[in-house]
Amino acid sequence: MSKGVGEAPGKILLIGEHSVVYGHPAIAMPVEGARARVEVDLARDGRIEIEAPDIAQRAVEGQPTPARLAPLQRLAGSVRELFGEPGVGLRVCVRSSIPVGRGMGSGAAVAVALVRAICAALDRKLADDQVEELAMEAEREFHGTPSGVDVAVTARRQAVYFVRGRTPQPIAAGESVFRFVIADTGIEAPTMAVVEEVRLARERDQARLDALFWELGSMASVAREIIRCGAPAEMGVCMSHAHAILKEVGVSSPELDALVHAALSAGALGAKLSGAGRGGVMIALVEDTAAEARVAAALRDAGAVGLFSAALSR
């Protein structure tokens, strides 16, 4: 029987956390150094089995399924049905270097990689937008009412300007290279729970929260032009201001604030939380490779449990 392999990168948000849920634009980019990889073997017994060694979990169709694997099991079934292969068994192995619950799109990346692996095993092809549509099935189970930005970035593997309900637009970078260091607080902050808390806060104080979301959305539009013009210093100002706004929204944490402070003190051009907040990761913009090493060392000293690099260029 055939084997298929699918891969997808993690992602980070540059600008637009939480405001993107309410229809404002956001900018996100892939993190190629953090990836999900899914291998699929076809079998004759008709069952879907999923192994996830990284989290020591296993799911077998027809038996009680761990909560983290249930959306993937259902997604695998949907892809199988789409191709008219309901009787084909799937042996799935999921591995990922993307930390779970940190706002780096781990669920989206695994879902995209799973769809692509099944396509490869069945020798079928899907366009990126079809992959996105299928992967969103699992994303909705993982996160409730996701914006779709995670799936868009991981499926397309390129930076995008994203507005919910519209086709993502690729970001055109200017001459400069935008270099980023991503630091993990080590604190899991499930997106669904934080988004729900922000929704309830908005119900209590809609005018204030909507004003903050409007400002974040406006900054995303400005940041797109800054990237196009190739102006890292200006991008750094945007990022740091966005962090201040997200603190007002109420989604930062002492750990995130400490890492942002450490990055700026070490010479980062800008720094902010990335993702839902209350934990997860932060991102710092650095001028060059020497600054990247200096900021990374400062973040480790400040308590970061993991570091990743990302770059945005022409």
Image (cartoon, rainbow, N blue to C red):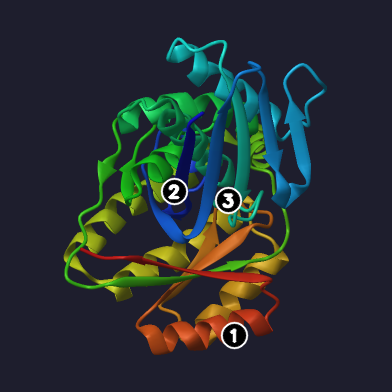
Residue appearing at x 36%, y 42% in the figure: 25
Identify the mark at residue 185; answer none if there is no mark: none
Visible residue check, residue 36: yes
Q: Is residue 255 above or below residue 51?
A: below
| Cα distance between the residues tagged 1 and 3 | 22 Å
Which mark is first along the chain, 2 or 1? 2
Quarter placement of the C terminus: bottom left
Q: Nearer the viewer, mark 1 or mark 2?
A: 1
Q: Which residue is mark 1?
A: 298
**In this picture, residue 230 sits left or right of residue 300:** left
Residue appearing at x 73%, y 59% in the figure: 187
Q: Which residue is mark 3?
A: 103
Amino acid carrying label 1: it is Ala
Visible residue check, residue 210: no
| Cα distance between the residues tagged 1 and 2 | 26 Å
| Cα distance between the residues tagged 3 and 2 | 13 Å
Q: Which residue is mark 2?
A: 16
Residue appearing at x 32%, y 47% in the figure: 160
